[in-house]
Image: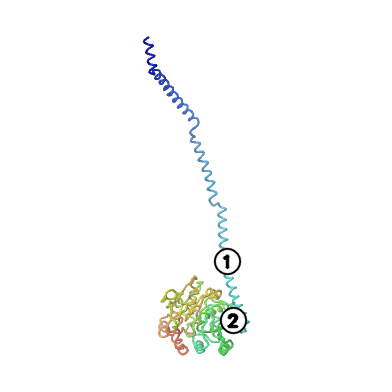
């Protein structure tokens, strides 16, 4: 009775719940352990660790693949030969292009000469001996153009009597020393007038003129210089082309020796380099109307050779000939020439022997063994009263006649 009541009491109080809870916990623990064991079994079967030999085998396979890729990227023996052949072909092509450029340049010069001759025929101008195209077949060391004017007959005669070989000696100079010397002059504003007839008569007597298709005038010196170089390079195939004024004394042998030192350079511009002020004031000598192109007022010109005497190599003379229609002319002729070479790969040679003073300056230098190429007075931009004084300069500063004929260039 008492036991029955006790069970009833526990049942009313939820006594069977603890018994059920204990059983549930045991089953839960059992299920967890079983699940854990099954998980281990499943994991061991599914995730088998690869053997070391498999890893090695895979690495060897990868190395073979990398080797194949490396062989594909690297140059093979056949490819190296192909590369050498390509480089050789490029070099031969470059040489062929250089040869073609020289050929084109020669053809352009011959064409310029033919055009000059054709224009002379159309204009009714006679083609003098120095304008024959056959002259360009012979190779010369230098062409010396003496810039002169209609009024400079006395200066020309004084030069013929001093440093310029005359008559048969001039022809011998051309044959033996390969040196051409000509007085350079254009035409008057009235073609066929008295001035032109006087030059024609003088040329007939001496045969030492180079006539240009150009109207003479002091303000046209830049144009005359351009036409001179273009015409000279079309007539004579020379290594150097020189422009000199007719009031300057020149030692020809010393000039030739000086130029010969630079014959290996393709583009040479030789003279006494200077950089004078740009004169903006009107009415003064050497006034530059385009002064504003050279910067602020008071600036100086770029370096260029003084106009009394300068020399340029064949390539530069050819450049002037080809581009003469687009080369700008400034008021001063020496500035114009210097401007044409700005931006080009040109060697500017500053040689002060090309601008010595008159005696005693050139005389002292000659006694010291440093013979001058050219002599003049800076104050006169030439020899002051050159027609009267050039003989004295020649006697005291000249190199001697034997120096020319014994010189080897």
Crowding at label 2, few (<14), some or many (≥20) Cα neighbours within 10 Å?
Answer: many
The reply to whether discs 2 and 1 touch (Cβ–Cβ < 8 Å) is: no
Q: According to the image, label 2 marks what residue? A: 131
Q: According to the image, label 1 marks what residue? A: 97
Q: Is residue 343 above or below residue 370?
A: above
Residue 104 in picture, x, y percent from top left:
59, 71
Residue ID at (46%, 26%): 35
Crowding at label 1, few (<14), some or many (≥20) Cα neighbours within 10 Å?
Answer: few
Q: Quadrant of the N terminus?
A: top left
In front of the other: 141 or 202:
202
In front of the other: 313 or 168:
313
Residue ID at (56%, 62%): 91
Residue 229 in picture, x, y percent from top left:
54, 78
Kindly state the secondary structure of the residue where label 1 is placed. helix
In front of the other: 38 or 290:
290
Kindly state the secondary structure of the residue where label 2 is placed. helix
In the image, taking residue 9 as reference, residue 110 lies left or right, namely right
Q: CA distance from mark 2 to mark 1?
A: 31 Å
Residue 323 in picture, x, y percent from top left:
55, 74
Residue 50 in picture, x, y percent from top left:
49, 34
């Amino acid at each position: 009775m008492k036991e029955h009541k006790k069970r009833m009491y526990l049942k009313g109080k939820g006594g069977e719940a603890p018994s059920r809870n204990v059983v549930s916990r045991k089953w839960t623990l059992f299920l967890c352990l079983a699940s854990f064991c099954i998980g281990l079994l499943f994991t061991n079967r599914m995730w088998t660790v690869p053997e070391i030999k498999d890893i090695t085998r895979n690495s060897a396979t990868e190395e073979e693949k990398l080797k194949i890729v490396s062989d594909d990227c690297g140059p093979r023996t056949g490819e190296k030969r192909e590369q050498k052949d390509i480089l050789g072909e490029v070099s031969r092509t470059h040489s062929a292009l250089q040869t073609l450029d020289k050929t084109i340049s020669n053809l352009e010069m011959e064409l310029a000469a033919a055009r000059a001759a054709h224009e002379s025929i159309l204009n009714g101008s006679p083609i003098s001996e120095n304008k024959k195209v056959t002259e360009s077949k012979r190779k010369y060391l230098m062409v010396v153009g003496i810039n002169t004017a209609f009024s400079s007959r006395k200066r020309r005669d004084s030069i013929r009597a001093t440093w310029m070989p005359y008559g048969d000696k001039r022809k011998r100079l051309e044959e033996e020393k390969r040196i051409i010397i000509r007085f350079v002059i254009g035409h008057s504003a009235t073609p066929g007038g008295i001035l032109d007839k006087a030059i024609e008569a003088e040329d007939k007597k001496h045969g030492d003129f180079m006539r240009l298709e150009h109207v003479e005038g002091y303000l046209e010196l830049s144009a005359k210089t351009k036409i001179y170089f273009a015409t000279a390079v079309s007539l004579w195939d020379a290594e150097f082309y020189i422009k000199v004024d007719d009031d300057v004394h020149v030692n020809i042998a010393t000039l030739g020796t000086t130029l010969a030192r630079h014959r290996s350079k393709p583009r040479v511009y030789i003279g006494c380099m200077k950089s004078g002020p740009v004169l903006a004031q009107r009415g003064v000598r050497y006034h530059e109307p385009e002064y504003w192109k050279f910067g602020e007022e008071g600036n100086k010109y770029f370096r260029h050779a003084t106009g009394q005497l300068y020399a340029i190599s064949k390539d530069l003379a050819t450049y002037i000939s080809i581009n003469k229609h687009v080369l700008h002319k400034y008021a001063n002729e020496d500035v114009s020439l210097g401007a044409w070479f700005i931006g080009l790969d040109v060697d500017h040679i500053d040689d002060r022997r090309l601008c010595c003073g008159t005696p005693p300056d050139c005389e002292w230098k000659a006694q010291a063994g440093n013979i001058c190429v050219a002599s003049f007075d800076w104050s006169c931009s030439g020899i002051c009263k050159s027609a009267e004084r050039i003989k004295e300069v020649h006697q005291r500063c000249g190199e001697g006649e034997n120096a020319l004929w014994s010189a080897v260039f």
